[in-house]
Amino acid sequence: MKKTETNSVCSNGLLHFIGTGAENAVPRRALMSLTGLDDRELRRTIEGLRRAGRVICSSAGGYFQPASLAELSDFRRREENRARSIFFTLRAARTLEKRMAAEAQAE
């Protein structure tokens, strides 16, 4: 089986185990056990599903599909805050990179 076919099978199987609503969140370890995927494969598969347009929320309780506008909005806000944090970190790295490049050129 090709890697893309394997990913498709895993994705379809994975969705079967991800419940709807935060109260039905499935912990990552349980999903690993149910699907036979290791941690890295599971995260990649979930990311692939998200990039394909599926909304899979995550919380301290695990992964779930949103059952309400409130759950979806909460997930979106948390993801936006996470993205903002990453961008601030990258901004500092870019600033340092420019400074170091200028110093290297001056030498």
Image: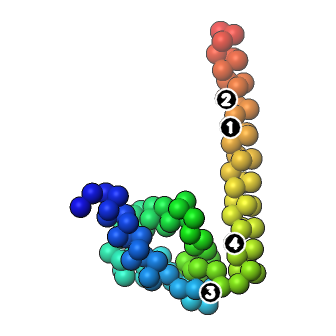
| CA distance for labels 2 and 4 | 33 Å
The amino acid sitting under disc 3 is: Gly
Residue under the image location 32 percent in, 62 percent down: 5
Q: Secondary structure at mark 3?
A: loop
| CA distance for labels 1 and 4 | 27 Å
Q: Which residue is mark 1?
A: 93
Q: Residue 106, relative to residue 80: is it above or below? A: above
Q: Residues within 10 Å of mark 2 (few under 14, many from 20)?
A: few
In which quadrant is the N terminus drawn? bottom left
Q: Residue 92, relative to residue 21: is it above or below? A: above
Residue mark closest to the camera, 3 vs 2:
3
Query: Which callout, 3 or 1, points at the residue further toward the start of the chain?
Result: 3
Q: Which residue is mark 2?
A: 97
Q: Give the side of residue 9 with respect to residue 50, left or right.
A: left
Q: Quadrant of residue 16?
A: bottom left
Q: Residues within 10 Å of mark 3 (few under 14, many from 20)?
A: some
Query: Which callout, 3 or 2, points at the residue further toward the start of the chain?
Result: 3
Q: Which mark is residue 37?
A: none
Residue under the image location 53 percent in, 85 percent down: 19
Q: Residues within 10 Å of mark 1 (few under 14, many from 20)?
A: few
Q: Give the side of residue 51 with respect to residue 93, left or right.
A: left
Q: Which residue is mark 3?
A: 21
Q: Which residue is mark 4?
A: 75
| Residue lying at the far bottom of the rendered structure | 23
Query: Which callout, 2 or 4, points at the residue further toward the start of the chain?
Result: 4
Q: Secondary structure at mark 1?
A: helix
